[in-house]
Amino acid sequence: MLKDPIIHRVPRRETRPCDEPGSGRRPRRPRTRRGITTIWGLASIGLLLTVAAVVVDGAMLYGAHADLQNAADSAALAGGRVMAVDPDYARQLAVEYGAKNTAAGSPVAIASEDVEIGRWDKDMRTFTPVAPSEEHLADAIQVTAGLTEDSGNPLRMAFAQVFGEGEADVVARATAVYKPRDIVVVLDLSGSMNYDSQIRHIPFLGQAAVEANLQQIWTELGANTYGNMGFTPTYIFYTEMWYVRAILGLDGVPYPYPSGSWDDYILYVQRDNAIINNGYQNRYGGLTFVNYLLDRQRSASQTPDLWQVSAQPLTAVKNAVDLFLDYVEVAATEDRIGLAIYTGPGGAGLLEHALTDDMDALRTITWQRQAGHYTGSTNIGGGIETGRLELDANGRQGAQKTLVLLTDGVANLPGSASEARGFALDQAQYAANSNYAIAAISLGANVDTDLMQQIADTTGGVHFHVPGGQTVADYEADLTDVFRQIARERPLRLVR
C-alpha cells in the first residue's frame, strides 16, 4: 500500500501595504549620516589647531625661556666676578654679557635695574637685596631677563593668535652665589723675615729707613738703658772685652733675654760682616744691639719679646693677613681659614690652627709669631705639605680648597738646596692631584721667583711677586693689594 507523500509547506510572506504593487509608497532607504560627519570634521579642525598651538607655541615658549635662562646665567656669573670690588661695574658687566645672547631671535636686553645685589639664605633658599651702602658685603647677585609686555618685547606666538592670544611674557631668573672656600694660609717664619729691619739691608732700603726702624723696635722693647748704653751707638776703638764692658757700664748688668750675652754682642759688633761693611764696626748702642737680637737671637726661645716689635717685612705680612681675615669675617662669606707656618720645630711645617671661622684666633696666633720663631731655615715643601694634609682631613665637600703660600727666601730644607726645591715641587704636584690650587706670593729681591711660579703653575694657581728694594710702606701696600685680591677672587655657583 502506498504511503502518502510528505509535503513541506512554505509559510507565505506577509506583505506590508507599502510593498504591495500600486500602493503608491516608496520603499524605505537607510538613514544618512552626512550632518554628523560635517560636525565632527569641524571639531577635528579645531582640535588640530589647538594641538598645533600647544605644540608649536609651547616649543617657542620653551626655547625662549631656555635662551633667556642662558642669558641670565651668563650675566649673573659675569657680574658676580667683580661684585665684591665694584657693585656698579658688576651691573654693567651683567648688562653687557646679557646682550651677547639672543632669545627668540632677538638680542636680550637686561636693564641695570634687573640686576640686584644682595644676600643668599642657603637654608631658606631665598635672595634678599641689600642697600647700596652694604653691597660691598653682599654674597649674591640676581639677574632677571625677560621678553615682556612691560619691557616692550613680549614673545609673539604663532598659532595662539587664532584664539586671540598673540603675545606672551617669558621671564628667566639666575642667582649666582659665592662658593665657600677652605683656605690654608702658609706663612714663611724663617729668619729672613726680619731682614728689612737689619743693617744688612741698608744697600736696598737706605740708612735712614733702617735706622729709623731699628729705633722703633728699640722703643717697642722698652727703650731700656743698659749701663751707659743708650740707642745712639758709641764708637770704642779698643777691642778688649773687659775694656768695652767697662766703657759701656755693662759689668754687673744682667743680660735681659734667655739667650745671648753681653760678650757675644760685643764680639758681634766687632766681627759681623754686615756690621763691618755698612760702617758700624765697634759702634755699641741700642741700634746695633737690636740688630744683634734680630740677626743672632731671633727665635722665640732666645728673645721672646720680638713678636711684639715692628720687624720687617714680617710686620707688613701680618698687617696684610689681618686685612684678609677682616674681609672674610665682615663679608660673612662662609669661608674657613687655617694657618700653617714653616719652619716649625724639627724642621718640618707646622699647623698653627686648623680650618676655622674664628678669625680672632688666627689674628692672635699670627701676631704672636716672629721671624725665626722656631727655626731660621726655609722648608717651603714642608709648609705646602702641612696645608695640604689639613685640607685632606678637614676640607668641606663642595668647598673650593686653596693654599696661600708666602715666602721671601729660598728653600733650604730638607737636605740640600736642590733637594729642598724638589721636595717643594713634589708637594705642589700632590696638591694639584687633589685639585688644590696654590696662590703663591714671593716677597723681596732674594726670593726664588722661578720656584714660586712653578708651584703656582703646577696647581693651576696664580703667582704674585712683591719686588724687593722698596720702602716698608710700599711693601705693605703691595702685600695688602695681593691679599685683597685673593680675598675677592672667589668662585661662583648658580643656585637657581
Image (cartoon, grey):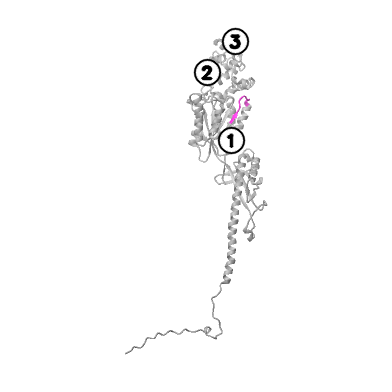
Q: Nearer the viewer, mark 2 or mark 3?
A: 3
Residue that mark 2 sits on: 260
Residue at the left extreme, as displayed:
1
**Crowd tier of the residue under label 1, counting other residues whose Cα lies within 10 Å: few below 14, some 14–19, many 20 or above:** some
Q: Secondary structure at mark 3?
A: loop
The answer to whether any part of residue 197 appears in the image is yes
Mark 3: few/some/many CA within 10 Å (<14, 14-19, 20+) = few
Comes first in the chain, label 1 or label 2: 2
Magenta-drawn segment: 464-472
SS class, disc 1: helix
Mark number displayed over residue 161: none
Q: Nearer the viewer, residue 290 or 158?
A: 158
301 inside magenta stretch = no
Disc 2 on helix, strand or loop?
loop
Q: Amino acid at mark 2?
A: Gly
Which-is-in-front pick, marks 1 and 2? 1
User: Along the line of sight, which residue is nearer the eye, 18 or 7?
Assistant: 7
- The x and y percentages for residue 437 are 54, 35
Q: Residue furthest bottom?
A: 1
Q: Which residue is mark 3?
A: 237
Q: Position of residue 468 (x, y in %)?
A: 61, 25
Q: CA distance from mark 3 to mark 1?
A: 54 Å
Instruction: For marks 2 and 3, give the CA distance.
Output: 23 Å
Q: Residue 137 lies in what quarter of the image? A: top right
Residue 487 - label: 1
Looking at the image, which residue is at 60% across and 54% down?
A: 60
Amino acid type, label 3:
Phe
Task: Identify residue type, mark 1.
Answer: Ala
Considering depth in this image, is 170 or 395 the residue closer to the camera? 170
Whichever of labels 3 and 1 marks the residue nearer the N terminus, that label is 3
**Could you tell me if residue 225 is visible in this image?**
no
Tally of numbered discs: 3
